[in-house]
Image (cartoon, grey):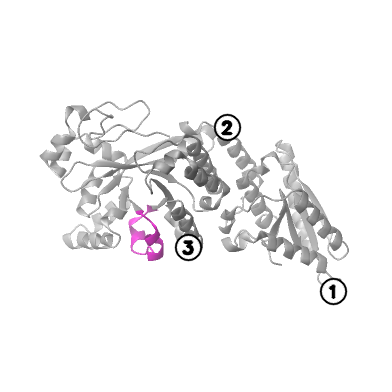
Amino acid sequence: MVGFHTAALTQRCIARDHTRQALLRIAEDETPGQPDRLALLFDFSGIPEIGNRLFFRAMLRFLEEGTGGRPLAVVPIALNCVVAITDSDTARIILEQMNRLASFLRERRHGSFEVSCFDLKRGHWQFAEICRRLAAERPAPAPDRSLCLKEDAPPGMEALDTLITVGEVLGRADIATLLRQQSVWFFPPDAAPVKVGREFWISMRAVEKLLGLPLAQHPWLFERTTQFADHCVLTHMLQNLGPLSLPLGINLHLATIFTGDFRRFAFGLRGAGARQAAHRHDLIVELPVQECLQYPEAYAPAADILDEQGICIALDRLQWQDLAALPEAIARRATYIKVIWPSVAGHAAQASDAEGMAAMATLLERFGADKLVLTRCDHPDAIGQGLRLGIRRFQGRGITRYLFNTRSVERLLGRRIASHLFRPWHLRLPAAGSEPAAPGTAAPGTGPGRPGPEYHI
């Protein structure tokens, strides 16, 4: 059967109408000479949370891989309705497992779902007619093309139950209280460092505290929660984003780029006066490099979508050892490559002689100094080490500590730059709850030079 399986590529997922027509042909053309086959029609409308596409996909993956001895092809046929066609023995196993799930959901007060079973030898015309009626009366929403990426199935019914709780809590939460921010600094030759961007993300530690759950101990749930966080950030930004004085970076999963929420976000930015007046590439989407490497067939169309919207890509979370093997096709589409400093420091410690450092610098030259950002710079030593390698963009908690240390700045950048940074009007106390303001980030109108106003979302 030509199935709408979650491992399908984007192009196949878009052709959902062809998939449904194939399903109807199977039902209509079924003959007594073919193997014993049953159609199972699941209607999940009785679960209030099923309207959340992330939870809907988790249900599908549970049905596909968590209910039988082998993977099952599941076809969305109407709003919140899916169909699986299989043999009678497998159908019996699936029904037993799904009946247990239905009872479990009812006990947890999450609603339930209905299952209809059709014998395709005797009732294929009836099955086809019901599918047509459902598709006409309850048309399915536009396909969420993030299904082109294969997602792990839930490890059990309890995981589905907890995922419902995660969605409910995050849906009610004040996202602004979960957001964290950090500046990106540029250290130009013979000049004072300046802010060139800021990254926003949802703190998973804050989410764990809000939920009262140790998400880090449950990989499947952690991954789904970060996907929920993506959609929360997009909604929050669309409602609160004003004019940008500096480029803004947001962390998203690769799959999120294909979702309806991201399409609405991009459309909203296009229509906003602030966005129309802003410079191109003032928004940066930071994608985990591991996902880009794992799904290169999805990375290319995602990069096309972002480029059409004038949005930059930053490849995030690279270890030093990732750089040498990073494919040119992936690196070329990215405006920035963010490398984790501890991995660079560890490699530099092993190659501490001049020849070893030169080899590291040669590798970095492949990408260019303007493209590289050294991240997680929690210790001021990261700046000196990065500058020696030719890197000039830095991000991390250690940057501000370094900029407030007069001797460290003089030693690395010289007395002239240090004297410029430590003029009286450059020093101010940080606002409560915000990132400390470093020298060189004066409030608007408080001194010479080029410091821009702070921006907020």
Provide residue 20's location: percent of width, then percent of height.
72, 60
Q: Quadrant of the N terminus?
A: bottom right
Asked if residue 265 can be seen in this view, the reply is: yes
**Sequence-first disc among 2 and 3:** 2
Residue, disc 1: 33
- Name the mark nearer the viewer: 1 or 2: 2
**Sequence-first disc among 3 and 1:** 1
In the image shown, does 381 or 335 lie closer to the viewer? 335
Provide residue 154's location: percent of width, then percent of height.
61, 50
Asked if residue 217 can be seen in this view, the reply is: no
Question: Which amino acid, mark 2?
Answer: Arg
Provide residue 131's location: percent of width, then percent of height.
79, 56
Report how far apart the C-alphas of labels 2 and 3 lie in the structure: 35 Å
- Look at 58% across and 55% down and name the residue there: 145
**Sequence-first disc among 1 and 2:** 1
Q: Measured along the vertical axis of the image, is residue 206 above or below residue 66? A: above
Q: Secondary structure beneath disc 3?
A: helix
Question: Which amino acid, mark 3?
Answer: Pro
Is residue 113 found inside the magenta-colored segment of the image?
Answer: no
Q: Report the label total.
A: 3
10 Å crowding of disc 1: few (<14), some (14-19), many (20+): few
Q: Measured along the vertical axis of the image, is residue 219 above or below residue 302? A: above
Question: Which disc is residue 172 wearing?
Answer: 2
Question: Which amino acid, mark 1?
Answer: Gly
Report how far apart the C-alphas of labels 1 and 2 lie in the structure: 55 Å
Provide residue 403's location: percent of width, then percent of height.
22, 37
- Look at 63% across and 50% down and name the residue there: 57
- Look at 71% across and 35% down and name the residue there: 109
Is residue 330 found inside the magenta-colored segment of the image?
Answer: yes
In the image shown, does 216 or 332 lie closer to the viewer? 332
Residue, disc 3: 296
Extent of the magenta region: 317-336
